[in-house]
Image: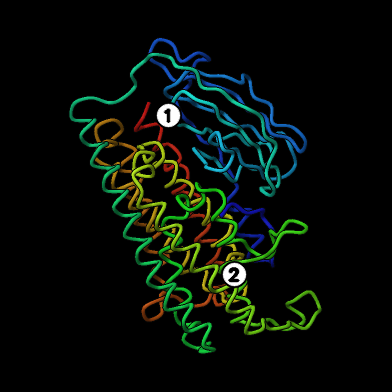
């Protein structure tokens, strides 16, 4: 999930600094009204205490939010559904002084916008209205067929991943509750890859992601910690020195049963939601493109810094899963992009292959070495490759929908 950037050592600091460097996206320029067939363009300024938009309304259709971080902390920007929970579109990992574009296709209705300085909490929110422009921005002809194939294929992919996630979680929970910690540790990373491949989908539901995937470092005051990383810590119990100077107290059997059962129930809930007709109807080309970029942001702010799996050090499994999910999303949109921006396709094909090649160097058996086995140069090399892929991937959505 979206996380504040918290350094856990020199490798994390180096990776984060490298991933943030030069992070400015370039989408096509937009006018303020969306007239003459162009997208409606809005500016957003995020500071520590404000989220200032150039307008609180926009016409339906293609929207481009140009988000500038005028604060001192890394920030992110969200367009939320009327319930304030479901994420319609988001752009993350905007460093101080940088700007990034969020490209989306918005239907008429009531929404909320939110900036999250520090990338924590509920964010600075305000109502936002999309009026009915009357314009039909839906693609036609061969392009429409290609996009339909992409969305249909991506929905099927998400369903398959949630089904495999549920099967793996059932086995993991059974092992964990029975006290077979060795089996639970063996199942932990291979099961979580199915979550990590579709993480933007899980995030879009708002309520499930914090319950299932919140890290201890990102807990708000008074917030209960549940989910995968709570059980991770119990399986890879830290020393006092790694636990803030306090001896770790293992979960009781009752706590194990309670938290494991909740994780399983939430996983079943996720599968049910992604198998609904409502979910399938919400998947669009811009959602797929933005999701691909979001997965690379997850790599930059958590996996390549070693902050995601701080107890088990299985971050490279998650790294691969995020890359898998981004590649599947891109592959689904590739036929559309070939027609509209062949140079971008050539660049993305090259950058995906380069990053995969670097990651393959750290394989061990069916998985990967522990993150702690990477040295400073290896982390830097991965970070540079993530950044190199992230820039062209940030242009994918605009290439497809504008």
> Quick check: 335 left or right of 212?
left
Where is residue 40? Give x, y as percent: 48, 19
Asked whether the beta carbons under mark 2 and mark 1 sit within 8 Å of each other, the answer is no
**Which quarter of the figure is the N terminus placed in?**
bottom right
Where is residue 233? Give x, y as percent: 63, 76
Where is residue 244? Give x, y as percent: 79, 74
> Quick check: 303 left or right of 255?
left
Residue that carries the numbered disc 2 in the rendered image: 229
Where is residue 331? Give x, y as percent: 29, 48
Q: Quadrant of residue 287?
A: top left
Question: 173 above or below 198?
Answer: below
Q: 106 or 292, which lies in front?
A: 106
Is residue 362 visible in this depiction of the protein? no
Give the secondary structure at mark 1: strand
At x 53%, y 54%, the residue is 298
Residue that carries the numbered disc 1 in the rendered image: 105
The residues tagged by marks 2 and 1 sit, at their Cα atoms, a distance apart of 34 Å
Give the secondary structure at mark 2: helix
């Amino acid at each position: 999930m979206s996380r504040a950037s918290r350094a856990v050592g020199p490798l994390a600091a180096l990776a984060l600094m490298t991933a943030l460097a030069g992070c400015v996206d370039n989408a096509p320029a937009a006018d303020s009204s969306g007239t003459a067939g162009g997208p409606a363009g809005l500016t957003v300024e995020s500071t520590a205490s404000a989220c200032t938009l150039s307008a609180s309304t926009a016409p339906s259709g293609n929207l481009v939010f140009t988000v500038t971080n005028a604060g001192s902390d890394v920030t992110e920007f969200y367009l939320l559904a009327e319930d304030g929970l479901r994420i319609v579109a988001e752009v993350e990992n905007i460093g101080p002084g940088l700007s990034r574009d969020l490209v989306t296709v918005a239907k008429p209705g009531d929404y909320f916008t939110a900036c999250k300085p520090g990338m924590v909490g509920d964010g600075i929110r305000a109502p936002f209205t999309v009026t009915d422009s009357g314009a039909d921005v839906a693609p036609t002809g061969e392009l429409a067929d290609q996009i339909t194939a992409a969305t249909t294929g991506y929905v099927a992919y998400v369903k398959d991943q949630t089904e495999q996630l549920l099967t793996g979680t059932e086995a993991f929970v059974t092992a964990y509750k029975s006290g077979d910690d060795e089996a639970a540790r063996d199942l932990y990373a291979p099961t979580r890859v199915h979550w990590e491949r579709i993480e933007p989908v899980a995030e879009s539901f708002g309520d499930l992601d914090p319950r299932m995937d919140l890290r201890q470092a990102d807990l708000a005051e008074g917030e209960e910690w549940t989910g995968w990383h709570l059980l991770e810590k119990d399986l890879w119990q830290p020393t006092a020195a790694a636990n803030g100077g306090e001896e770790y107290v293992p979960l009781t059997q009752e706590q194990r049963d309670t938290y494991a059962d909740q994780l399983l129930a939430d996983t079943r809930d996720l599968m049910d939601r992604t198998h609904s007709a409502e979910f399938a109807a919400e998947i669009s080309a811009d959602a797929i493109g933005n999701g691909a970029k979001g997965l690379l942001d997850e790599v930059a702010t958590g996996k390549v810094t070693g902050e995601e799996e701080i107890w088990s050090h299985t971050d490279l499994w998650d790294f691969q899963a995020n890359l898998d999910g981004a590649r599947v999303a891109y592959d689904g949109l590739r036929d559309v992009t070939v027609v509209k921006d062949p140079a971008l396709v050539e660049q993305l094909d090259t950058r995906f292959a380069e990053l995969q090649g670097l990651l393959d160097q750290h394989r061990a058996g069916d998985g990967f070495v522990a993150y702690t086995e990477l040295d400073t140069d290896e982390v830097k090399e991965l970070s540079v490759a993530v950044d190199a892929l992230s820039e062209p991937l940030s242009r994918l959505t605009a290439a497809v929908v504008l």
